[in-house]
Image (spheres, coloured by chain):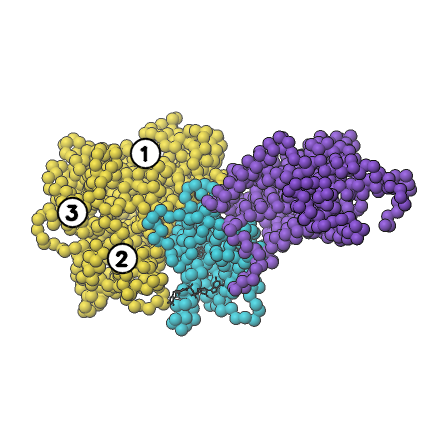
Chain colours: A yellow, B purple, C cyan
């Protein structure tokens, strides 16, 4: 295996990847397998390899420190435009996914009933023909559910699915589908535009958790730092509107606790004021459309329903209009309701009204050429799950299900009949690398390599003003008997059509594509490709020459604002339920990484578990102690978690982080905490079909037993909360405003 | 002069009474030893377990890095002050009534210093590296840091242990000789060795008296310095609630307070078990009671002075500790402690009739010691639990390993004491005799006695 | 601030310092994981975490201010302040906590016997203790950084300002026959911090970013009144 691997690397001539440490000499080191010590491995001397982070879809550039054949540390690639050398907690924890003790070590076949979770190892030479055979003989449709893919892998996978006449869906628990739908309607584009936050000087965020796990967290972090203190004498102002004082809200100058679901209404109110005060810079021809959208609300109603005073609304409108570079963004809670699409249109429209489209500090659009063949793969919204399950059941077709690196059985609520879709399948195969709740139902598992063991590329830059075509290269020898998904797909394609045409291997395919790309796009087209290739690998990808700014054009803003719908009568279920992705665990994907389990939630300092957040006044009225186990009931079930008194929360809201409550997914994740998704109602954003995760009403019942709440604040106690700043901030001078 | 000195006829009885405890113990004694040994083994087992698995077997955690073990160390060093104070100070002031009680106290000193030292070892995270604390010559020229109060402490405790061993030993020599002359079997050579060939010549007595005269003031000074330094372990730090100038005298007085309490307990038991009513008389309880009263008042005064400054100064960091103790999570132990070491002694010891009631005195002694143990825990824990960055506030209660080790150590102390009683005369025989002689001499002439030799 | 460490007159080429801009810190905790990965910080696990023993060399303290709805949360990244007059140093009986000529508060693991006095006397609760031997479920241990010691049971530890990275930076500069440049050396937390809330550098170089930023009018030291003279300057958060 190792010998093969080595020859393979040499055959491809993929020897590049130099060190990127500042000041280190650019001598090119070879990628050498650990088991075969090479003369050029210097014990104790680190090699750094550039690649791309795969922990979320932002695709930050990384450099990986490798010593004696083992990856030791991941840092941001300083040359990469998206993250500029920085990296988030999840990106760094990717190492623990690589070395995870519960990683699948090779192909597995299920033995016994599905519920038994018993598997036996099989070889690739058994597993691959079995799957090919199953696909060849399936009577039902082939359905593949995958995490969002990009670049060459996306092409290979969709090509394979096309060749078997199946359907491929991208599934992501928080893809911000209502926002995408609104962007599509407002600007007529499929992907998300870039928010130029670094240059903004007034950011009005409607629930967008851009300092948490939202779209491109590191690039937003960088932009936020610049917006605050990166410019001389110009500090951007930031107002955040959300029912809960989230991690993002904590960095705001002002937090406005809005009533859930009313983000759009507030935007309408602000837009109304902007238009009626003639602060609009819209061309006259466009004005009527906007007036019909924003004109229909009265300030009284807005104030009444949003719970934000008229004075505050006027203040927001005034500051927004008077700022040089105002920027309104929506996401997170603004995506969490049945009226999310309309809300986003209203929020996006604010930017159009003040004319900050295609301007520094506003909403812009960049596009990468060449490699950016983003296949038009549909998203698997929760409503689509429901429709799919119903259609299959009605026609009594039993699908063959393929899964890749996503976990819908964990992250979609049971009221969305995802389980039925799985139950109905005639055969399930998974390419995921660990036994999560979805993969554990599979009949056959052909595990993918870890990102750091494989080849790939990634076209990135949604929401970030920086676009790049980024490369993924193996930096360590695969630890286990796994195979890259690209190679598995090529192998399956070949088995199914019986030919020997097509690419030899996935790495070869990538190299070929990059060669074509290079000849058409690079200023170095005349140079021999091999040396360019080595430089590309060393740098981590290609950016400068591929990006062009494109103008956004306003298309339609027609929408009928609808109030949000909620599930549950106020008498029985008086509280809004507000599940939010835990900043560290990112919808549960990080729950199997001990570093992330142990990373304190910044707001509560909680680790290794779940909790519910409750306003201290509400808690006192209900007699709920900090740390006490509380049962949250909705019409669809109940969930238990210890209570945390959370001062930054509306008194009529119960908040709970998403990410825990796994039943499988390895020793660190399984049987820890609770999953709030299990009690959600099947309500959807009308336009995009995304689950309205904020639309469930609940009741809280104290159980009068202590819960398992572990806080790092007040270590060793569950007291948390009331820490006082005993005047520890004592600036030297009082005129501190610089 | 062929006249026998007055009181001469009492001497055989004294010998008999005071040597009696050295006789082999009965069933009760053996049972007691077995019981104590069992608890000691439990403690030893817990310690081994703690070394084997990690100091995490305690309930310590940041920011509370010290607690039960160090509190116990302070407490036992305090108890050790009984010996030096009773015998040293009283000897220095030539208080005649001290005679029957010095040995009881001095034995306590040695044993409690040993126990206290053990607590340092329990406490070390890497006790197997304890010798880093010793300034031994080494190639790398790495030395301990004598700027650390812990080094002063190690030095002081070592000095104190050495000095009090000598201090206990010197007056034992004539008694050892006495035992040597009256005992047979395997113990005879041992006592011969220990009595250094004492024959009771004039020169020997003169030398002994000189030695005692020299070491007595020294040991008192060492005693005061030792507990001052133990106080400075805390006082020298920045920890709010520890960092106070009054802490050294406060610790010394507190130590004497618990030490006196412990002496009363010891006296009561020795008197009761060996029927030494004629030696340990009500007068002794009365005098000790008065001393304890003085200590109660002094300690209360120091405590008040300290707390008043904190309260009036109202520095938030310091005040938060005070609030936690007075009305916060530590209020119950705090007010229990105040009752046990201030209120109860004050109420009872002011009554002369109470002071003449040995069982009552025993109870006060117990109260003071329980109270002082709590007090040591309260000095240690709440200040550490309330660091300046309030995000890190915490609390603490000892784990079963800590409690077992503490119980084992207490049992070890009692065990050692019980064994020592069988080995050294528990009342200094020659001093008692000397006292009787002084008494006889001075009794008729009330107008004053010649102090010159 | 006078730096009293080291013999007078002896040249001190570097004095490592950090600036933490509270107006930038978003509490994202990228720094926390970076520090764990770089410095082989143990996995404490739920049990030790519940006992209050989870080890973090850098933590983001969150302080609530005010009451709903006018409530604010403030973040305060706290790590060892590398005090020029470090209260943790003189109290250590065995010199395990000591000051390097370059202004670092160094912890000599081999020498530490676990008296924990230093932990009590650090006013910032920066010091962390190994109550048990660390454990990694295989193959997680393959990630361990060979440049950093794994600390055993009974030893105190804390932020080192990533001394191994400082040393590498200096050695690199020496190999290339040039002085260390500003920005050459970044501790792991600084390296990762997305918002650049953390800046590290040589306080003896008046043109370094850290030296310039430390002079900001927003600057203050944590618990400044204690006179510990920290090497970390915080810049106050600005908001209404
Ligand atoms: N290239 C090469 N490698 C070798 C060898 C070789 O000949 N060549 N020989 C091998 C052999 S035989 C051996 S024994 C090992 C030796 O290898 P090492 O044990 O690494 O020995 P040194 O490099 O001599 O010293 C280690 C470090 O200890 C520091 N030091 C010196 N005194 C003290 C002190 O008092 N306290 C502390 N904490 N540190 C101190 C030194 O400054 C140095 O940085 O190397 C082996 N490796
Ligand atoms: S933002 Fe996403 S891609 Fe970037 S480092 Fe974090 S997890 Fe990786
Ligand atoms: S912050 Fe604490 S550990 Fe660090 S140097 Fe200062 S006193 Fe020592
Ligand atoms: S714990 Fe270690 S560093 Fe701290 S005082 Fe003790 S020996 Fe010194
Ligand atoms: S400077 Fe290094 S050791 Fe200190 S907190 Fe940052 S990463 Fe950790
Ligand atoms: S990485 Fe930077 S912004 Fe994030 S918590 Fe740490 S210091 Fe704050």
Question: Which element is circle 3 on?
Answer: helix
Residue A227: quarter of image: bottom left
Q: x%, y% of residue B99?
A: 77, 41
Disc 2: host chain: A
Decide which of B289, A320 is in the foreground and name it: B289
Marks 3 and 2: in contact by CB < 8 Å? no
For the point 47% across and 35% down, the residue is A626
Question: Which element is circle 2 on?
Answer: loop
Q: Residue furthest top?
A: A571
Viewed as shown, does residue B181 lie left or right of A374?
right
- Are discs 2 and 3 located on one and the same chain? yes
Residue A571: quarter of image: top left
For the point 55% across and 49% down, the residue is C120
Q: x%, y% of residue A139?
A: 11, 37
Q: Report the disc number at residue A678.
A: 1
For the point 90% across and 45% down, the residue is B1
Q: Residue furthest bottom?
A: C177
Is residue B139 something that shows in the picture?
Answer: yes
Decide which of B399, A17 is in the foreground and name it: B399
Quadrant showing the N terminus of chain A: bottom left
For the point 72% across and 38% down, the residue is B19
On whether ligand 2 comes within 8 Å of the CB at mark 3, the answer is no
* Of callouts 1 and 3, the N-terminal one: 3
Is residue C218 something that shows in the picture?
Answer: no
Decide which of C232, A345 is in the foreground and name it: C232
Q: Distance from label 1 to label 3 (Cα)?
A: 39 Å
Mark 1 or mark 2, whichever is nearer to me: 2
Residue identifier under label 2:
A35
């Amino acid at each position: 295996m190792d010998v093969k691997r080595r020859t393979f690397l040499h055959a491809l001539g993929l020897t590049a990847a130099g060190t990127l440490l500042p000041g280190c000499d650019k001598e090119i080191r070879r990628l050498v397998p650990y088991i075969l010590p090479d003369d050029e491995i210097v014990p104790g001397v680190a090699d750094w390899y550039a690649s791309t982070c795969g922990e979320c879809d932002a695709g930050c550039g990384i450099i990986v420190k490798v010593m004696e054949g083992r990856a030791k540390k991941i840092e941001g690639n300083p040359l990469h435009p998206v993250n500029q050398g920085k990296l988030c907690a999840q990106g760094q924890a990717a190492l623990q996914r690589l070395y995870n003790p519960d990683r699948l070590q090779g192909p597995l076949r299920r033995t016994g009933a599905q519920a038994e979770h018993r598997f036996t190892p099989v070889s690739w030479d058994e597993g691959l023909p079995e799957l090919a055979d199953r696909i060849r003989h399936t009577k039902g449709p082939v359905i593949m559910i995958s995490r969002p893919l990009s670049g060459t892998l996306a092409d290979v996978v969709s090509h394979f699915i096309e060749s078997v006449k199946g359907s491929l869906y991208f599934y992501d628990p928080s893809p911000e589908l209502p926002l995408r739908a609104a962007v599509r309607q407002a600007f007529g584009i499929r992907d998300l535009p870039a928010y130029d936050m670094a240059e903004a000087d007034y950011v009005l965020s409607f629930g967008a958790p851009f300092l948490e796990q939202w779209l491109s967290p590191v690039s937003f972090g960088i932009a936020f730092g610049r917006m605050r203190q990166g410019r001389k004498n110009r500090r951007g102002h930031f107002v955040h509107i959300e029912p809960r004082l989230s991690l993002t809200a904590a960095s705001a100058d002002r937090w406005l606790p809005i009533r859930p679901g009313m983000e759009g209404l507030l935007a309408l109110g602000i837009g109304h004021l902007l238009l009626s005060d003639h602060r609009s810079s819209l061309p006259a021809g466009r004005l009527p459309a906007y007036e019909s959208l924003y004109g229909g609300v009265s300030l009284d109603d807005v104030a009444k329903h949003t719970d934000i005073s008229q004075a505050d609304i006027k203040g927001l409108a005034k500051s927004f209009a008077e700022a040089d570079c105002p920027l309104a963004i929506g996401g997170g809670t603004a995506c969490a309701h049945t009226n999310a699409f309309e809300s986003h249109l209203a929020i996006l429209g604010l930017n159009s009204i003040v004319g900050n489209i295609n301007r520094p500090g506003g909403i812009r659009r960049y596009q990468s050429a060449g490699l950016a063949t983003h296949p038009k793969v549909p998203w698997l919204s929760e409503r689509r799950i429901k429709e799919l399950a119903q259609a299959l059941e009605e026609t009594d077709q039993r699908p063959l299900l393929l899964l890749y690196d996503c976990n819908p059985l964990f992250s979609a609520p049971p009221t969305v009949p995802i389980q039925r879709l799985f139950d109905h399948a005639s055969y399930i195969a998974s390419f995921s690398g660990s036994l999560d709740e979805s993969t554990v139902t599979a009949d056959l598992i052909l595990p993918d390599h870890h990102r750091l063991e494989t080849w790939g590329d990634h076209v990135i830059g949604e929401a970030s003003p920086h676009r790049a075509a980024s490369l993924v290269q193996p930096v360590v020898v695969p630890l286990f008997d796994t195979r890259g998904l690209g190679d598995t797909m090529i192998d399956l394609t070949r088995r199914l059509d019986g030919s020997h045409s097509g690419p030899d291997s996935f790495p070869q395919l990538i190299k070929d594509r990059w060669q074509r790309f290079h000849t058409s796009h690079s200023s170095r087209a005349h140079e021999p490709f091999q040396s360019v290739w080595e430089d590309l690998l060393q740098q981590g990808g290609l950016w400068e020459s591929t990006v062009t700014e494109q103008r956004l054009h306003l298309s339609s803003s027609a929408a009928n604002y609808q109030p949000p719908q909620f599930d549950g009568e106020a008498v029985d279920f008086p509280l809004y339920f507000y599940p939010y992705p835990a900043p560290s665990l990112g919808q549960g994907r990080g729950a199997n990484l001990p570093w992330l389990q142990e990373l304190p939630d910044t707001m509560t300092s909680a680790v290794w578990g779940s909790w519910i957040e409750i306003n201290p006044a509400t808690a006192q009225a209900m007699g709920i102690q900090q740390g006490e186990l509380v049962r949250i009931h909705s019409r669809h079930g109940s969930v238990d978690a210890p209570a945390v008194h959370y001062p930054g929360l509306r008194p009529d809201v119960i908040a709970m982080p998403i990410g825990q409550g796994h039943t499988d997914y390895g020793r660190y994740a399984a049987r820890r905490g609770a999953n709030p998704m299990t009690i959600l109602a099947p309500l959807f954003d009308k336009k995009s079909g995304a689950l309205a995760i904020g639309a469930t009403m609940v009741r809280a019942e104290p159980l009068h037993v202590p819960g398992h709440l572990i806080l790092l604040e007040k270590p060793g106690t569950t007291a948390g909360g009331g820490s006082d700043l005993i005047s520890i901030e004592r600036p030297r001078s009082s005129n501190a405003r610089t | 002069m062929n006249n026998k000195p007055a009181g001469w006829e009492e001497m055989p009885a004294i010998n008999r009474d005071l040597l009696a405890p050295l006789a082999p113990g009965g069933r009760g004694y053996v049972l007691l030893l077995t019981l104590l040994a069992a608890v000691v083994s439990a403690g030893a087992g817990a310690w081994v377990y703690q070394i084997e698995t990690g100091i995490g077997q305690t309930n310590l955690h940041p920011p509370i890095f010290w607690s039960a073990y160090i509190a116990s160390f302070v407490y036992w060093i305090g108890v050790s002050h009984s010996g030096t104070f009773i015998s040293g100070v009283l000897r220095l002031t030539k208080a005649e009534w001290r005679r029957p009680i010095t040995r009881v106290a001095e034995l306590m000193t040695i044993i409690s210093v040993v126990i206290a030292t053990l607590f340092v070892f329990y406490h070390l995270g890497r006790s197997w590296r304890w010798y880093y604390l010793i300034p031994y010559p080494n190639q790398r020229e790495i030395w301990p840091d004598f700027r650390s109060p812990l080094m002063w402490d190690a030095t002081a405790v070592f000095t104190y242990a050495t000095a009090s061993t000598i201090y206990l030993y010197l007056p034992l020599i004539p008694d050892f000789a006495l035992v040597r002359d009256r005992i047979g079997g395997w113990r005879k050579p041992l006592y011969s060795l220990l009595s250094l060939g004492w024959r009771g010549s004039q020169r020997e007595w003169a030398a002994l008296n000189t030695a005692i005269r020299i070491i007595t003031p020294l040991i008192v000074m060492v005693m005061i310095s030792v507990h001052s330094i133990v106080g400075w372990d805390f006082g020298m730090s920045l920890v709010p609630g520890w960092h106070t100038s009054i802490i050294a005298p406060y610790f010394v007085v507190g130590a004497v307070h618990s030490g006196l309490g412990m002496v009363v307990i010891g006296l009561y038991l020795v008197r009761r078990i060996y029927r030494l009513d004629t030696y340990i008389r009500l007068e002794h309880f009365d005098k000790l009671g008065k001393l304890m009263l003085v200590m109660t008042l002094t300690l209360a005064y120091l405590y008040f002075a300290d707390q008043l400054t904190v309260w009036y100064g109202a520095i938030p960091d310091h005040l938060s500790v005070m609030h936690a103790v007075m009305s916060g999570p530590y209020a119950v132990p705090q007010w229990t402690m105040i009752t046990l070491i201030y209120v109860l002694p004050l109420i009872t010891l002011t009554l002369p009739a109470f002071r003449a009631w040995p069982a009552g005195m025993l109870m006060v002694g117990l109260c003071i010691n329980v109270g002082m143990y709590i007090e040591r825990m309260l000095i240690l824990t709440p200040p550490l639990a309330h660091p300046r960055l309030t995000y890190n506030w915490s609390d603490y209660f000892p784990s079963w390993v800590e409690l077992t080790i503490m119980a084992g150590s207490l049992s070890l102390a009692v065990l050692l004491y019980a064994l020592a009683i069988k080995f050294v005369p528990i009342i200094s025989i020659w001093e008692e005799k000397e006292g009787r002689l002084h008494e006889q001499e001075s009794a008729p002439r009330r107008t004053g006695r010649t102090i010159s030799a | 601030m006078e730096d009293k460490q080291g013999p007078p007159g002896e040249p001190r080429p570097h004095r490592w310092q950090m600036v933490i801009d509270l107006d930038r810190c978003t509490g994202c905790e990228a720094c926390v994981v970076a520090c764990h990965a770089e410095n082989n910080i143990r996995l404490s696990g739920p049990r030790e975490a519940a006992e209050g023993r989870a080890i973090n060399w850098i933590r983001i303290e969150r302080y609530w201010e005010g009451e709903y709805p006018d409530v604010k949360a403030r973040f305060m990244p706290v790590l060892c302040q590398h005090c020029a007059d470090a209260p943790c140093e003189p109290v250590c009986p065995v010199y395990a906590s000591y000051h390097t000529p370059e202004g670092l508060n160094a912890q000599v693991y081999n020498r530490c016997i676990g008296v924990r006095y230093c932990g009590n006397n650090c006013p910032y609760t920066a010091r962390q203790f190994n109550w048990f031997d660390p454990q990694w479920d295989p193959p997680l241990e393959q990630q361990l950084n060979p440049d950093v010691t794994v600390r055993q049971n009974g030893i105190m530890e804390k932020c080192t300002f990533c001394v191994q990275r400082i040393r590498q930076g200096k050695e690199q500069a020496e190999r290339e026959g040039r002085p260390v440049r500003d920005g050459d050396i970044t501790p792991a937390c600084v390296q990762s911090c997305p918002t650049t809330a953390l800046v590290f550098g040589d306080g003896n170089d008046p043109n370094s970013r850290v030296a310039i930023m430390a002079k900001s009018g927003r600057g203050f030291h944590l618990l400044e009144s204690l006179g510990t003279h920290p090497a970390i300057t915080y810049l106050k958060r600005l908001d209404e």
